[in-house]
Amino acid sequence: MEYEIDFLPVGDASSSGDAICLRYSSDQGVTWHVGVIDGGTQASGEALCKHIQTHYGTETVDFLICTHPDQDHASGLSNVMEQLTVKKLLMHCPWDYVDYFFDSVNDGRVTKESLRKKLIEGHPYAYKIYEHAIKNGIPIYHPFSDNENNHDIPHLNIVGPSGDFYLNQLINFRSITDITEDSLENENLFKSFAEAARKAINWISETWDEEKLVDPADDATSSENNSSVISLFNFNGKKILFTADAGVLALSKAADQIETLGYALQDFSFVQVPHHGSKRNIGPTILDRIIGKPKLTGSTETFIALISAAKEGEPKHPNKRVVNAFKRRGGNVIATQGITICHYTSGTPDRGWAPIEPLPFYTDVEDD
Ligand SMILES: [Zn+2]
């Protein structure tokens, strides 16, 4: 099978995002399946369209996956929807699920309609894609692991979240728990925090044999992140795992589902490092399970670990303990770092691009 995966750089400063496209063929390139997983910002959405036209030579996207409604993943997807021909849309539509969770949030002060409205207003980017699909008759599939792949996209398994797990995350979404975010104010606040963090950061040493990464608390990442679509592609035995911004809870459920489907864990060719390399989303226990236990120093690398992180995402994205944890377990770790297109291929025409320098093993890591 021929396939190629491209992670486009997102964000010109400290905010990370995902903009991913891929194509694959099981008939020596006679027909291709073209997919997009998240679109990053408006600028990266534009870049995705150009990339697909230039490098995949098509105006058609067979399937588009919106992993979760956060702006850094959903915003650029409207460019793709408007500029290219999208045949199938896979996304969660929380505003349509109110009937399923109303009883667990009803405290007498909310109505179904007010919840629906909050979910629409709280996720304008995702709702824009949804509206576009409805208007243009593009079928929407709800990407739940218990929907038995009714999307009918070859080689793709949705391994998370299950419907139940999703609803449990949804009831804690910021848009309906009244934790409002003034985006501009927050962004500025975040920037000064990030700057302060960069200056104040303390470094400690880490060795190959002494892992400093610890298992994060269950609520270390947001419910929105834990609601992310996790997808597994099986290209004739080569397994590719896309994790979006999923945290430990979501990833361990996905691991269960992968095993239920009859696939072995610890045997991936390519794994997306979740949430732009944040240490809030993974820890040693889940990594030991999904990608395997640490290997002896100097062992051969067995898979690609890809991090989609902003240029000035440090110190949060990617976290150096996280980079080291993947390297220790056999990962060849590469990162977009906001500037590089990460291209991973098997059997597709050579673009003549220079190989990407993998991230090193860091002997100094962040001290918290
Ligand atoms: Zn994200």
Image: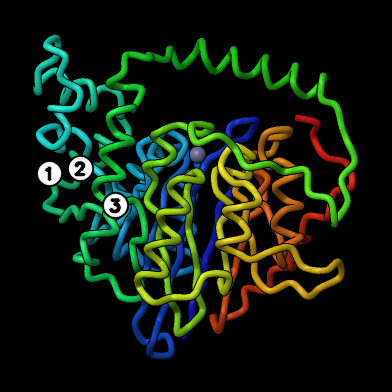
Left or right of residue 24, residue 103 in this image: left
Between the residue at mark 3 and the residue at mark 1, the CA separation in whole angstroms equals 28 Å
Q: Secondary structure at mark 3?
A: loop
First-in-chain label (3 vs 1): 1
Above or below residue 51? Residue 309 is above
- Near mark 3 (Cα within 10 A), the count class, few <14, some 14-19 or many ≥20, is many
Between the residue at mark 3 and the residue at mark 2, the CA separation in whole angstroms equals 26 Å
Circles 2 and 1: CB distance less than 8 Å?
A: yes
Q: Does label 2 point to a residue whose CB lies under 8 Å from ligand 1?
A: no
Q: Residue tagged by mark 1?
A: 135
Residue that appears at 71% across and 40% down: 319
Left or right of residue 301, residue 18 in this image: left
Please state which of the two labelled residues, at mark 3 or mark 2, is closer to the viewer: 3
Q: Secondary structure at mark 1?
A: helix
The quadrant holding residue 294 is bottom right
Residue type at tag 2? His
Residue type at tag 3? Ser
Left or right of residue 57, residue 206 in this image: right
Q: Residue tagged by mark 3?
A: 162
Above or below residue 136? Residue 367 is above
Circles 3 and 2: CB distance less than 8 Å?
A: no
- Near mark 1 (Cα within 10 A), the count class, few <14, some 14-19 or many ≥20, is few
The quadrant holding residue 30 is bottom left
Residue that appears at 11% across and 52% down: 137
Residue that appears at 20% across and 42% down: 132
Which numbered marker is on residue 260? none
Q: Residue tagged by mark 2?
A: 132
Left or right of residue 100, residue 344 in this image: right
x, y percentage for residue 307? 62, 51
Above or below residue 350? Residue 87 is above
Q: Does label 3 point to a residue whose CB lies under 8 Å from ligand 1?
A: no
Q: Quadrant of the C terminus?
A: top right
